[in-house]
Amino acid sequence: MTMPPFTTYPARALSRGLCAIALATGIGVTVPGCGGNVTSTSSEPAFATAARPQINTLLADTMTSGAVVYVQSPNGDWLESFGTAVRGTNTPIPTTAHFRVGSVTKTWTGTVILQLVQEGKLSLSDPVSKYIANVPNGDEITIEQLLTMRSGLYNYSTSLAFNQTLDAQPGKVWTTTELLDIGFSQPVYFAPGAEFRYSNTNTVLLGLIIEQLTGMSAADAMKARLFAPLGLTDTFLPPQDDTSLPAPAPHGYQWGTNAETTNSEALSPERQAAAKDGTLQPTDVTSVNTSWAWTAGSGISTVKELAAYVQRMVGGGYLNADLQAQRLASCVSVEPSDPTAASYCLGLAKFGTFYGHTGEIPGFNTFMGYDPATKTTIVTWATTASAPDGHAPANEIARILMGELSKASEVPSEGRP
């Protein structure tokens, strides 16, 4: 799927693959900075008034039952839920609802790994074989290449057999050994460092390295290092044997099966038509076990807590100034021939002037981004990973918001030419 000015990374990692590159940078959004902290006012920001009908239309067009939007910007703040928490009802979604963040989890993993680099417990140039045995090309793949998705390792979540198992056993508790066995059983895509190729196998390996070097579970390491310092109590990596969403939470839905969308998020034309005429209904996947995603994508959060996290991750506070600058400067386009393509960095992505990540996991789609120059935050999430035509609704909402914020930036402030 390609829709200027946003691009979807072509190598499938969605629904179970948690593709991070569903937005691109062609819009080149820059929101003007006003300095200081933004204070909410009783008047609604103009960008919210303009974006609301577009979001309602988008949700109807994509047959998405619900979404939540949160923006903090120099042009005003906006927090609002749309649609319903349960398909077929008029139950509103609380703006405090918990949701699955999908591949946003990768930024948690990447941030902890970089903290360990900062503490001298490992180096970006270390080979993965120093910590984990039997990784294909393990003596050549570096920690940095795992973080930047340039290892060449096969993405276990693109296996048809794996996806068939997800359909047949939605409650299965996956072990990391099972996931890596799938990832290691297939040929590598390319030599380490040669190209970009999104792979959840990379981030599962990084999760195991976190546990090895900290002596803690990955969940506890993330809590202690990332969430507790900010007082975030509703943001966490759930235990493998209980990945359920705490209340309040909406229901999440999936169009089609995991197997039929292994190679493309879009359903077949016939199935799309059936969705439109109502003969195909989505599956409620709220309670499926997401242990298969682990440190690559099983995280849970709330919209305000995710905003606080991304502000610190991008704006500074988790890493020292030098390593933080190195992280933000590490972004490389995922499609060098496409000027609109997003960039991928050390455990995060860049969309225009926003650093963050997207997340797609059965039942939920998330966008999280922060522009450090203007102190603008966008967090959106929706109750399906992708529409029947393959569009990711929360990513599309983020695009709408970026467009409206960009229009606001065209109004010059006093003293500017």
Image (tube, grey):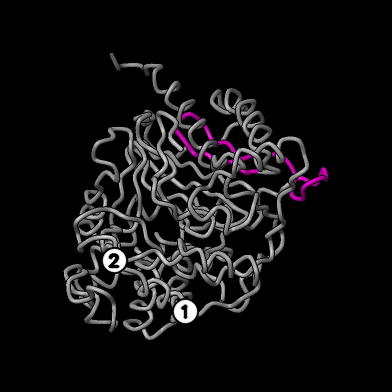
Displayed quadrant of residue 252: bottom right
Q: In the rendering, at what x and y percent does residue 12 appear? A: 44, 52
Q: In the rendering, at what x and y percent does residue 143 appear? A: 24, 69
| Image position of 73 with respect to 209: above or below | above
Q: Quadrant of the C terminus?
A: top left
The residue at the point 74 percent across, 45 percent down is 280
Q: In the rendering, at what x and y percent does residue 21 appear? A: 40, 47
Q: Are marks 2 and 1 in contact (CB under 8 Å)?
A: no
Q: Amino acid at mark 1?
A: Glu
| Left or right of residue 121, residue 28 in this image | right
Instruction: Specify which label sits upstream in the sequence, 2 or 1.
Output: 1
Q: Amino acid at mark 2?
A: Val
Magenta-tinted stretch = 67-92
The residue at the point 22 percent across, 56 percent down is 321
The residue at the point 38 percent across, 38 percent down is 24
Residue 87 forms part of the magenta stretch: yes
Residue occupying the far top of the picture:
417
| Image position of 151 with respect to 171: above or below | above
In depth, the one of 63 and 163 nearer the eye is 163
Q: Residues within 10 Å of mark 2 (few under 14, many from 20)?
A: some
Q: Secondary structure at mark 2?
A: loop
The residue at which mark 1 appears reads as 178
| Left or right of residue 330, residue 284 in this image | right
Q: Secondary structure at mark 1?
A: helix
The residue at which mark 2 appears reads as 188
Q: In the rendering, at what x and y percent does residue 58 appear? A: 62, 32
Mark pair 2, 1: CA separation: 17 Å
